[in-house]
Amino acid sequence: MKDINIEEKEREFQAKIDADIKIEPNDWMPAEYRKTLIRQISQHAHSEVVGMLPEGNWITRAPNLRRKAVLLAKVQDEAGHGLYLYSAAETLGSDREASIDDMHAGIAKYSSIFNYPTLSWADMGMIGWLVDGAAISNQVPLCRCSYGPYARAMVRVCKEESFHQRQGYEIATTLANGTPEQKAMAQESFNRWWWPALMMFGPTDAASKHSALSMKWKIKRVSNDELRQQFVNVTVPQAELIGLTIPDPDLNWNEEKQGYDFGTINWEEFNQVVQGNGPCNKERLDARRQAKENGMWVREAALAHAEKRKAKMAS
Ligand code: BYC
């Protein structure tokens, strides 16, 4: 039987959520609310950090200095997003190193999209346009998330993601308006990224196991399927504008719902990727583990310095 005191606290907690009052780190919160947030925020942080790898692959091969400088800045922004998010998870009592180790061990998830390879320069356009575009659709509602530190981190992240989306669309536009070879490169890349971008929003509402509670607690404000639909509605005209074809024979404007109907997502592929069997899962985790190992001496030196300073201040 539940403690009366806890029931009262839960009622007060839900009343705050219903009144759109932000929950702050020292406020009382149900254990499950804390757990859900730590899960989502740390997965989000891991996605930002693993997400640096596919684009990092092209920094040395950018076609000119301007493109290289922009791509470098974008990848650095993603590292910054990871840091805000790890800090937000720490306000809930999450141990950053333990959570990173869970990701390296394949226990903690990160976004499915980063398990696909970047095979051509056009992929830099598609990641910015489609992947950051999908991320914005998902993250703008998170700026109104009930947990204060997560909501506030999202405001800055969304501003930077908007710039990323525009730089990606600009690359796609330049290629689509270029030589026939460049246009073909853009279309080939678009064909590879379209469906995985739709998968980023997660399982259908019917299959999403966390949505009901997350919506009740206003961690999520808009459902997976609604966000996916919004993304399709916004992106199809952008593709048409630059002359790219959506790789979906079932795509049709539906006058009644004022949105596009689209084909069925390959959920078997999504499940395989999430379970660790995507094209690049192993490569991504190996790269992150290697980075941790290679950076160990820096951490050890910094910690030794901190310890020395502490001892000096104490004496
Ligand atoms: N990939 O009940 P559901 C970026 C998991 S990075 C992998 O609907 P929830 C960028 C889900 O975790 C931006 N796993 O869950 C960076 C759950 O598994 P667990 C990344 C997925 O949490 C660099 C299970 O499936 N954005 O922009 O209510 C360069 C059931 O799902 C995925 C975020 O992280 C997936 N796609 O909703 C460029 C946004 N989808 O935990 C760009 C924050 C679902 O039970 N996260 N799963 O083992 C969210 O908004 C939500 O967590 C989700 C899923 C909508 C993703």
Image (cartoon, grey):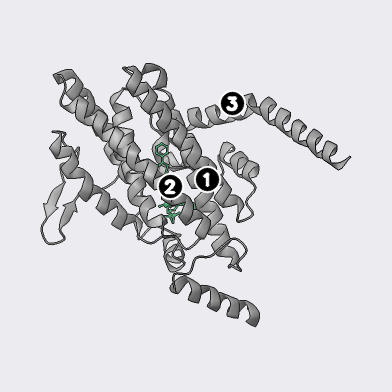
The spot of residue 54 in percent (x, y) is 41, 29
**Amino acid under label 3?**
Gln
Helix, strand or loop status at disc 2:
helix
User: Mark 1, residues whose alpha carbon is within 10 Å: few (<14), some, or many (≥20)?
Assistant: many
Q: Quadrant of residue 293?
A: top right
What residue sits right under mark 1 in the picture?
84
Q: Is residue 67 visible?
A: yes
**Placement of the N terminus among the 4 image quadrants:** bottom right
* Above or below for 162 versus 62: below
Depth check: give the residue in front, 263 or 190. 190
C-alpha separation, residue under disc 3 versus residue under disc 2: 29 Å
What residue sits right under mark 3 in the picture?
290
**Amino acid under label 1?**
Tyr
What residue sits right under mark 2 in the picture?
156
> Does the closest atom of ligand 1 sit within 8 Å of the Cβ of label 3?
no
Q: Which residue is rendered at x = 50% and y = 38% of the image?
A: 80
Q: Which residue is rendered at x = 61% and y = 69% of the image?
A: 28
Q: Is residue 67 left or right of residue 100?
A: left
Q: Quadrant of residue 247?
A: top left
